Amino acid sequence: MDRWNYLLVLAACLAITAPLELFGAGVYRRAWRAAAAILPVAAVFIVWDVVAILAQVWTYNPAYLTGVDLAGILPLEELLFFIVIPLCGLLTYNAVDTILRRSKRKSVRQR
């Protein structure tokens, strides 16, 4: 079971933030915008990770990984981390921004 821990944490992050899609214009409904925000940054950090792994500066505990490595170097879970966590951040930001804008409009109308 330990080898699924990293993936389970990522799945939990997605599950917890998924309902936030109901607020505002949505992140999943504008996937191209989410991809444009996430993928360039993810690419930089993936290269950074690969360089650190090859230089033996950075390692992963295989007990917590599925064993699926991309190009024999980067654990699948690490690639998913660079996509899932920023996606959860976008969902959270979008929801908070929408709630704050709605409350601001509501307070202006009440004056």
Image (cartoon, helix red, strand yellow):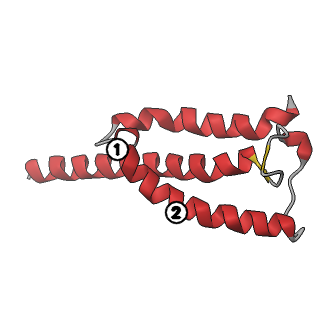
Which residue lies at the image location 59% right of the left edge and 59% below the top edge?
42
Judge from the rendering whether residue 84 lies leftward or rightward of residue 105; answer left or right: right
Using the image, determine if residue 5 lies above or below residue 110: above
Kindly identify which numbered label has been placed on residue 103: none
**Within 10 angstroms of label 1, few (less than 14), some, or many (20 or more) residues?**
few
| Residue 93 in sight from this viewpoint | no
For the N terminus, the image quarter is top right
Judge from the rendering whether residue 7 lies leftward or rightward of residue 95; answer left or right: right
Q: Nearer the viewer, residue 26 or 31?
A: 31
Residue 30, percent from left and from top? 34, 44
Q: Circle 1 is placed at which residue position? A: 30
Residue 93, percent from left and from top? 42, 52
Q: Nearer the viewer, residue 10 or 16?
A: 10
Amino acid identity at mark 2 = Pro
Using the image, determine if residue 6 lies above or below residue 50: above
Q: Circle 2 is placed at which residue position? A: 40
Amino acid identity at mark 1 = Arg
The CA distance from mark 2 to mark 1 is 17 Å
Judge from the rendering whether residue 101 lies leftward or rightward of residue 1; answer left or right: left
Residue that sits furthest to the front in the current view = 71
Residue 105, percent from left and from top? 16, 50
**Circle 2 — which element?**
helix
